[in-house]
Image (cartoon, rainbow, N blue to C red):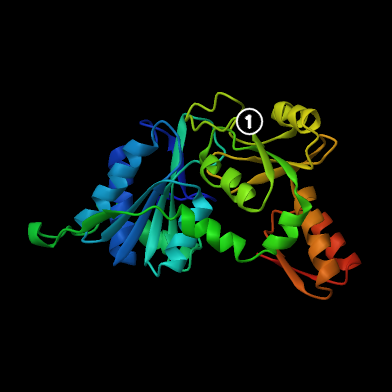
């Protein structure tokens, strides 16, 4: 059987590999399997509104109750699906890919991306022509809901807000013209930080820099961190599920190095505990964990 899903959902160049018709039929297939109440969100790409409408149409056609969450980061949609007790979600995003791409991520009720066995069931339905559609009196319904506020509250509930506020950090946030502009600056302000931003206007052409934050395109962030004497710089990808850090010297901490720093700090405070990381991570994570007496769970 042919495959639709890759390692991070379904992706392709818009109106070439990834068309509204494909997204509609794919979403209908996912909605038929997941059923019930489904959230739909999108990143800021030029084509995302068009494709989100196609996804919503497919879900309504199979009788789902759709919660249209509009523009938001992928982690915000995942949080909302789990914490609102929904049956699943559809996120329209191509993450860090160039602007001509877009994609579809299917989210399960626990807020995690669909496992391969669910993807295979969706693909089977799709390649058989799609699921049966509901008669006119049984099509689904749609309502709007913005979960950004509850997402920020949720993040704050997991950190020592007062301890951070006392430090009065100065932070530079670079959303890369992506949807992290809707969450990261506000979250930082609520933590008592003095916040500066760069590339904070949502623009699907990503005019400020490439949508994937890399050392070779974060020069503007590094310079601003040094100019304003900031404690930290943070750069995000297009849908806000990837972050790269810049220290007070303007040095970019790229890839697994940033997680290694977080893991080392965590294991200092929680010796002997387990940290989880994808199998694509480098061995530096395991080395840091071993030195700190921790254990690595490869996912």
Note whether residue 18 is visible: no
Image coordinates of residue 256 in percent, x first then y, are 76, 50
Q: Which residue is farthest bottom?
A: 272
Q: Which residue is mark 1?
A: 198
Image coordinates of residue 126 in percent, x first then y, are 31, 53
The residue closer to the viewer here, 291 or 33, is 291
Q: Is residue 150 left or right of residue 134?
A: right
Q: Is residue 60 left or right of residue 46?
A: left
The residue closer to the viewer here, 18 or 70, is 70
Image coordinates of residue 97 in percent, x first then y, are 55, 36
Note whether residue 67 is visible: yes
Q: Is residue 41 left or right of residue 217?
A: left
Name which residue lies at 74% across and 29% down. Answer: 224
Above/below status of 221 relative to 75: above
Q: Quadrant of residue 81?
A: bottom left
Q: Quadrant of residue 155?
A: bottom right
Q: Which residue is farthest top?
A: 207
The residue closer to the viewer here, 112 or 14, is 112
The residue closer to the viewer here, 246 or 34, is 246
Name which residue lies at 59% across and 46% down. Answer: 184
Q: Is residue 113 left or right of residue 252?
A: left
Q: Residues within 10 Å of mark 1 (few under 14, many from 20)?
A: some
Q: Secondary structure at mark 1?
A: loop
- Quadrant placement of the N terminus: bottom left
């Amino acid at each position: 059987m042919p495959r639709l899903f890759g390692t991070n959902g379904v992706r392709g160049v818009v109106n070439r590999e990834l068309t509204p018709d494909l997204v509609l039929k794919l979403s209908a297939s996912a909605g038929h399997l997941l059923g019930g109440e489904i959230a739909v969100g999108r990143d800021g790409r030029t084509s995302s509104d068009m494709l989100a409408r196609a996804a919503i149409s497919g879900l309504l056609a199979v009788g789902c109750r759709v919660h249209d969450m509009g523009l938001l980061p992928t982690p915000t949609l995942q949080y909302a699906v789990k914490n609102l007790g929904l049956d699943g979600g559809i996120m329209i995003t191509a993450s860090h890919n160039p602007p001509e791409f877009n994609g579809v991520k299917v989210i399960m009720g626990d807020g995690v991306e669909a496992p391969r066995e669910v993807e295979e069931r969706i693909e089977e339905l799709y390649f058989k022509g799609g699921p049966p559609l509901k008669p006119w009196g049984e099509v689904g319904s749609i309502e709007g809901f913005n979960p950004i506020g509850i997402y920020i509250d949720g993040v704050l509930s997991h950190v020592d807000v007062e301890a951070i506020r006392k430090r009065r950090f100065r932070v530079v946030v670079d959303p890369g013209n992506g949807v992290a502009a809707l969450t990261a600056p506000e979250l930082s302000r609520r933590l008592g930080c003095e916040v500066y931003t760069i590339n904070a206007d949502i623009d699907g052409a990503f005019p400020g820099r490439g949508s994937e934050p890399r050392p070779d395109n974060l020069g503007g962030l590094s310079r601003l961190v040094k100019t304003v004497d900031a404690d930290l710089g943070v750069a995000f990808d297009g849908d806000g599920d990837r972050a790269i850090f810049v220290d007070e010297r303007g040095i970019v901490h790229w890839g697994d190095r940033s997680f290694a720093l977080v893991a080392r700090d965590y294991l200092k405070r929680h010796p002997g505990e387990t940290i989880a990381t994808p199998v694509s991570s480098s061995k530096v994570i395991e080395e840091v964990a071993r030195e700190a007496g921790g254990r690595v769970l490869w996912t």
